[in-house]
Image (cartoon, rainbow, N blue to C red):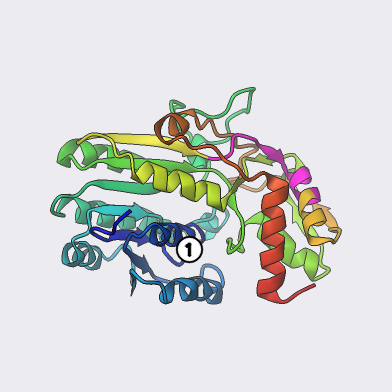
Amino acid sequence: MSAGAPILVTGVAGFIGHATAHRLLDRGERVIGLDIVNDYYDPALKQARLATLAGREGFGFHRGDVADAEAVARIVRENGVTRVIHLAAQAGVRYSLDNPFAYQHSNLEGHLSVMEACRHAQGFEHLVYASSSSVYGDKPMGGAGFTEDEPATQPVSLYAATKRSCELMSESYASLYGFPQTGLRFFTVYGPWGRPDMAYFSFSQKIMAGEPIEVYGEGRMARDFTYIDDIVDGIVGALDHPPQRHGHRILNIGDSHPVGLMEMIETLENALGRKAEKIMRPMQPGDVTATYADVSRLNALTGYKPKVMLAEGLGRFAEWFKGYYAVN
């Protein structure tokens, strides 16, 4: 694909943003990255991700706060941006219990800043933004996956509430101002260059250091683990298929094969070649029992179909982890 107007990727130093930017550059797009590079988790990892992008043709980077509406608008205006992939956010369910205002600032104000920049842009084509499976709340998992038609009216964490709020904000802006928007409800994403606050990553750090791991929900939780390359397939596919003017849609993006926490740990142990010492803990406030994505709508729109199963994906992660941290 030939490069036209650059694509703005917010949260480009993050796990998903970094991988998405590489994919766009691989196909000849120009990418402008925006990230504040904060210390929610190790900034050195974020800098290392950025270093893999820094020398690539067609990539430019702005360090800044996505909630700085004037700065975001200036980036969009001065670069003629007509497509945005908005991934910047304050993540984490448990962190929101102690730091609620970080979610107001990054998630709500940040989302509004991006939408305002998009609505004033000339010839704007499509805003794709990150929502979360957390919006479904602690829904009992039956034989079918969570569908986009679920009411999503009972979030059990502030993080989830802010993500649902962003969806409602986008619905109103699409109706009022016409520019097309797609919200992607991400399920649990994993893989190389991942987030240290995610269970598989933090477990790996402790297992390799010979320390015990804390297993919340006494191991009864299940997650729809989705490999990073499959997630990027879905993001880029959605970007390439915008809704009509005034259109706003919500799409699940996951694997559709929920895996129990204990099975994930066993698979991770095999990938790392080490056994974990486990300390069983009760469910934590804000956690949900299970997530399970119905991705039929994304599949119908883009042909999305996850390819990497958990054993292969955790194997790739373990290889990267040992290399990055120089552990055996």
**Residue at the spot 40% in from the left edge and 48% down from the top edge:** 236
Q: In the current view of this chain or complex, which residue is farthest to the top? A: 143
Q: Could you tell me the amino acid type at mark 1?
A: Gly
Q: Nearer the viewer, residue 242 or 218?
A: 242
Q: How many marks?
A: 1
**Residue at the spot 58% in from the left edge and 39% down from the top edge:** 255
Q: Disc 1 designates what residue? A: 14
Q: Is residue 34 left or right of residue 311?
A: left
Residue 179 in sight here? yes
| Residue 209 image-quadrant placement | bottom right
Classify 232 as above or below 244.
below
**Residue at the spot 76% in from the left edge and 66% down from the top edge:** 206
Mark 1 secondary-structure assignment? loop
Give coordinates of residue 52: x percent, y percent: 49, 72
Give coordinates of residue 233: x percent, y percent: 47, 46
Q: Nearer the viewer, residue 82 or 172?
A: 82
Give coordinates of residue 253: x percent, y percent: 49, 40
- Magenta span covers which residues? 254-266
Q: Is residue 49 left or right of residue 170?
A: right
